Image: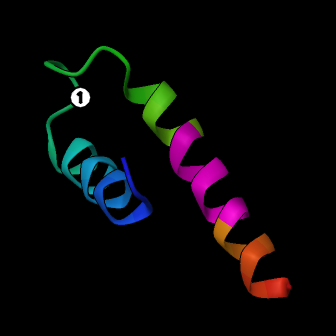
């Protein structure tokens, strides 16, 4: 899975309601990690 697909999956997960998506906190953590990763890549 490339970065664009990952970003799209995260975006879809955020658009979903919380109840059918039990791993919602995990998605938030993944999204934060993704932002840190992109920030690190831009720093270099």
Q: How crowded is mark 1: few (under 14 residues within 10 Å), some or many (20 or more)?
A: few
Does the magenta segment cover residue 33? yes
Q: Is the magenta stretch mostly helix, strand or loop?
A: helix
Of 42 and 18, the residue lying toward us: 42
Tally of marks? 1
Of 3 and 27, the residue lying toward us: 3
In the rendered image, the quadrant that contains the C terminus is bottom right
4 vs 34: above or below:
below
Where is residue 39 shown, x and y percent of the image?
A: 73, 75
Residue drawn at x 33%, y 49% as measured from the top left: 10
Assign a secondary structure to mark 1: loop
Extreme right residue here? 44
Residue drawn at x 27%, y 56% as measured from the top left: 11
Colour setup of the view: rainbow
State the image quarter where residue 21 is shown.
Answer: top left
25 vs 14: above or below:
above
Where is residue 1 shown, x and y percent of the image?
A: 36, 46
State the image quarter where residue 22 is shown.
Answer: top left
Q: In this view, does 8 lie to the left or right of 2?
A: left
Give the labeled residue for mark 1. Answer: 18
Residue drawn at x 36%, y 59% as measured from the top left: 7
Where is residue 37 shown, x and y percent of the image?
A: 70, 61
Per the rendered image, the range of residues in magenta is 30-37
Does the magenta segment cover residue 34? yes
9 vs 40: above or below:
above
Residue drawn at x 29%, y 56% as measured from the top left: 5
């Amino acid at each position: 899975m490339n970065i664009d697909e990952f970003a799209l999956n995260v975006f879809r997960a955020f658009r979903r309601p919380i109840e059918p998506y039990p791993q919602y906190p995990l998605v938030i953590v993944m999204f934060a990690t993704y932002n840190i990763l992109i920030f690190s890549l831009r720093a270099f």
